[in-house]
Image (cartoon, rainbow, N blue to C red):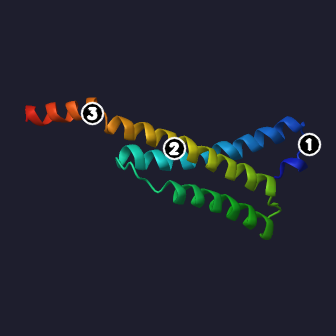
């Protein structure tokens, strides 16, 4: 149910928007971290991940607007969905840059060299 139709204080409305921000930011962040950490890919498709989250969020809101299920789409929800994705995108860029620095550091090469010598 849209927040403006609830018979509750406006604090629930802002909490709902925080939920939109967190859910889509969390999804974008987790998919990006999967590529960075699990797949060990320091060049993940961050833009594609972010845009897919934004498009998915917009698609949900458009479907809510056109479907006959007593739901309404909201441009404000699209904004917070997108803001969450974009925020996660920049956090992932920061994490990727840290991982690249670590991968190119002397410590990383020493650790790999000692592991190879032990075998």
Mark in the foreground, 2 or 1: 2
- Residue 3 image offset from top left, x and y in percent: 84, 47
State the residue position of label 3.
108
State the residue position of label 1.
7
Q: Name the residue located 51 percent from the left edge and 39 percent from the top edge.
A: 94
Q: Secondary structure at mark 1?
A: loop
Instruction: Of the two numbered discs 3 and 2 on the same chain, state the one appearing first in sequence.
Output: 2
Where on the picture, by quarter, is residue 110?
A: top left
Where on the picture, by quarter, is residue 105?
A: top left
Q: Label 3 neighbourhood size at 10 Å, few (<14), some (14-19), many (20+)? A: few
* Front one among 38 and 1: 38
- Residue 79 image offset from top left, x and y in percent: 75, 53
**Cα gap from disc 3 to disc 2, whole angstroms:** 21 Å
Mark in the foreground, 3 or 2: 3
**Cα gap from disc 1 to disc 3, whole angstroms:** 57 Å
State the residue position of label 2.
92
* Front one among 37 and 11: 37
- Say above or below: 46 vs 37: below
């Amino acid at each position: 149910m849209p927040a403006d139709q609830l018979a509750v204080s406006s604090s629930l409305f802002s909490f709902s928007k925080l939920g939109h921000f967190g859910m889509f930011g969390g999804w974008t962040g987790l998919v990006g971290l999967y590529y960075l950490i699990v797949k060990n890919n320091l060049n993940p498709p961050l833009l594609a991940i972010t845009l897919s989250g934004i498009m998915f969020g917009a698609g949900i809101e458009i479907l809510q607007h056109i479907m006959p299920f007593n739901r309404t789409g909201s441009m404000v929800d699209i904004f917070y969905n997108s803001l969450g994705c974009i925020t996660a995108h920049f956090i992932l860029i920061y994490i990727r840059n840290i991982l690249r620095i670590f991968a190119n550091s002397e410590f990383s090469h020493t650790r790999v060299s000692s592991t190879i010598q032990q075998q």
